[in-house]
Image (cartoon, rainbow, N blue to C red):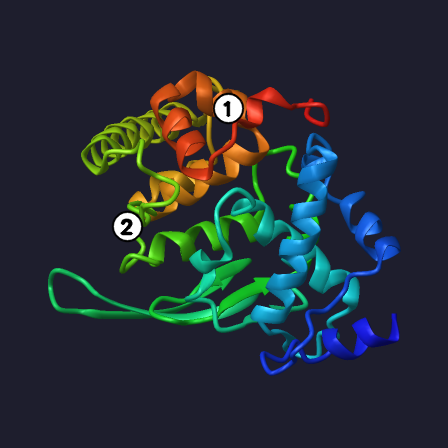
Amino acid sequence: MKLFKAISNRFSRLLAKRPQIPDSLWFACLAQLPFLQGLSREEIFRLKKMSEAFLSKVPIRGAADFELSNQAAVLIAAQASYVVLNLTLDLYDDVPAIIVYPSGFMVARKEVDSSGIVHEWNEPLAGEAIQQGGAIVLSWEDVENSMHGYDGRNVVIHEFAHKIDMKRSIANGYPPFLTAFHQSIKPVEWQRAFSEAFEDFAERVEAQDNHYHTDWDAGGSSHVAWIGPLPLDPYGATNAAEFFAVCSESFFLRPAPLAAAYPHIYSLLSRYYRRDPLERRSYHH
């Protein structure tokens, strides 16, 4: 434990020996990630080894006085490694570091509209994957709140899906297809399926927004019209990159609604990530 503590405080790329996660810490972390319960013993073993490799590859640091614990580091590493368990950590070569804030953090934004007017604002975030070799930034509070995965949301999986998407260039919902793993996926099939599904989902979100309204009568009572639950987090309607990240979250954590609404997308993600989460749903309700 002393050795691991020394390593976890630095996660230096210069260390010749990979950090070893003590079994007691490892299984304590697994208990906090119920979506891993369906993994076989062999997969749990591979996930541990991959998580140890991840910790030796990617520095994790606290920010704004957040004291990074061994447990926090392993929880992040395990979730990130789970995404690429049947692929390769090389997909994270674009991640130089992970920065962890104690809670949500503010990011300055700037945008020029069609009239040439510059708009600047501060946006509160739970996580961010920075383009072009940038770090992943996480809010630990939001990491903790999304570890159960029951609602299909997980900030670690979301941000690392973005980093996979960025491996080719910018995040645009078109991740790299690796020769060793993705021979069965035709790029044109991917682009067409995701484009059609994104347009459909954006229409569903817009329709729901238009139908979810409150009318107040003289007595102050309300009447709400609701057209039913969406199959995905509505944030996926933001753009193609967010749609891919949200679909990835749903694929791993809440696959049934995704498969029912967009079976072609589920099939493509199953071939991309090389697994079928619907085969093992012991934890989900």
Q: Earlier in the sequence, mark 1 or mark 2?
A: 2
Q: Is residue 135 above or below residue 261?
A: below
Residue 58 visible: yes
Q: Position of residue 81 (x, y in %)?
A: 59, 52
Q: Which residue is mark 2?
A: 172
Q: Is residue 179 left or right of residue 51?
A: left
Q: Quick check: can you spot residue 239?
A: no
Secondary structure of the residue carrying tag 2 is loop
What residue did someone put label 1 on? Answer: 218
Residue at x 34% of width, y 58% of height: 166
Quarter of the image where one finds residue 112: bottom left
| Residue situated in front as seen by the camera: 39 or 247 | 39
Q: Position of residue 165 (x, y in %)?
A: 36, 52
Q: Where residue 220 sits in the image (x, y, percent)?
A: 56, 27
Q: Quadrant of residue 10?
A: bottom right
Residue situated in front as seen by the camera: 225 or 156: 156
**Disc 1 residue type (three-letter):** Ala
Location of the N terminus (image quadrant):
bottom right
Looking at the image, residue 109 sits to the left or right of residue 52; the answer is: left
Give the alpha-carbon distance from disc 1 to disc 2, as whole Å. 48 Å
- Label 1, secondary structure: give it: loop
Q: Are marks 1 and 2 in contact (CB under 8 Å)?
A: no
